Amino acid sequence: MSIRPDDPRLAGLSPEDLATIDFNTNGQPGDVPRQPVPGTTVDPSTQGRGQFTAEQTAQIDALAKQAGGFFTGATQDYIDQLQAGALGGATDTLNALKTLVAQGQAKPTTPDTSITSDDSAVSETKTLSGSAANELKAILRRYGLESLFDPLSAALINDPTLIKNTDALFGSVRGTSQYQTRFRGNIEREKKNLPFLSEAEYISQEQAYLTVNKNLGLPRGFYDTQNDWANFIANDVSPVEYSNRIQQAYNVVKNSDPEVLNQLKMLAPELQDADLAAYILDPSRSGQEIERKARAATIAAAGKTSGGMQLTAQQAESLALQGVSTQEAQQGFAQIGQAAGLFRPLQGEETITQEDILAGTFTNEQAAQQRIARRRRRRQAAFEAGGAVNLQTVQ
């Protein structure tokens, strides 16, 4: 009795086992086929395709192509023989091919792997490819959301209908670390029981902050990162409120002591009103250089108004670095102003430089203090003598 390809007794055999059976003989399962030899090319013109009608041939060819997508090697040779009509009539051939297709569809797929930097294999996340991937990347790049490509791609693969509902699409990835990093402001808002912003609202608010910065001319690098904006959003600072704060900082600059502004322009001409407004808005974010120059200008202004002394940029910044406060500067320069006559040398007196005056007043430098004290004693001795004094004898 011959064995047909759809014989129930063959149920459960692998395609590789089926490929070893010669269905043209009366042998038993396991017999090696006499022809064609596996691996050789089957010539359809000599293997019985003429027994198939045109419709049957089309069905067989379609099933053979589908089955061939699942198998290789000996099984593919078996499929070729079926397609060539070498293993039975049309009904048997169609049933055998259908069985192969079913087995192929039931085969478990091996997940792709990618190699990490430490050469270990890990499962690769399913992502979109081709034009769909490019379109999604373009949209995400436009809004600075590139980090969400993998989770959003996987979500769309699992449920393509999400593309029609943006809220549902983003909702599917809100638990991912990428989302929580990108929309940190929203995560913090939830902790404070503040209303959750949609992703579109969140991004729109970021753009509004950036527009305020550009319109009001804030310096580059000042409150212009996603992390900065996340802090504003988390603390419910609207773009309007943010703009008002900057305007107030500009007003402080505009209404500052004119002499302070004058000293700033003299000592640090590179600083603009925007730099000063940024410093007033947040000194810690403006950088130590601007802070130091602003403090130096305040000290220089006190030197000019209270002491009648114009400091150099180096002198003013040196006092600022030494920690001289605005109040200390005003008091010290007031004393210098009151003793202005003492520092103007008379004939035969040693010169007391501006550096000596500053050092003797603010840093308690002994050498400078001694020169000032020596002159004071000489002047006092001359006054008590009622006239000129031998400066060589007064120590």
Image (cartoon, rainbow, N blue to C red):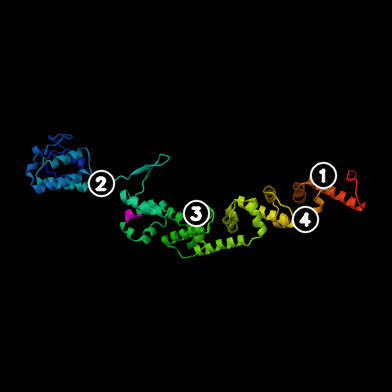
State which mark lies toward you, 3 or 4: 4
Residue projecting furthest to the front = 347
**In the drawing, does residue 364 fall left or right of residue 44?**
right
Residue 225, numbered label: 3
For badge 1, the amino acid type reads Glu
Q: Which residue is mark 1?
A: 350
Residue 107, numbered label: 2
* In the rendered image, the vertical position of residue 197 relative to residue 361, given as above or below: below
Q: Give the percent coordinates (x, y) of residue 23.
A: 12, 40
- Residues in magenta? 155-159
Is 244 or 52 nearer to us in this picture? Answer: 244
Q: How far separated are the C-alphas under marks 3 and 4?
A: 48 Å
Rendering quarter of residue 39: top left
Q: How far separated are the C-alphas under marks 1 and 2?
A: 103 Å
Q: Give the percent coordinates (x, y) of residue 6.
A: 14, 46
For badge 3, the amino acid type reads Thr
Q: Residues within 10 Å of mark 2 (few under 14, many from 20)?
A: few
For badge 4, the amino acid type reads Gly
Is 295 or 94 nearer to us in this picture? Answer: 295
Q: How far separated are the C-alphas under marks 2 and 3?
A: 50 Å
Q: How far separated are the C-alphas under marks 4 and 1?
A: 20 Å
Q: Residues within 10 Å of mark 1 (few under 14, many from 20)?
A: few
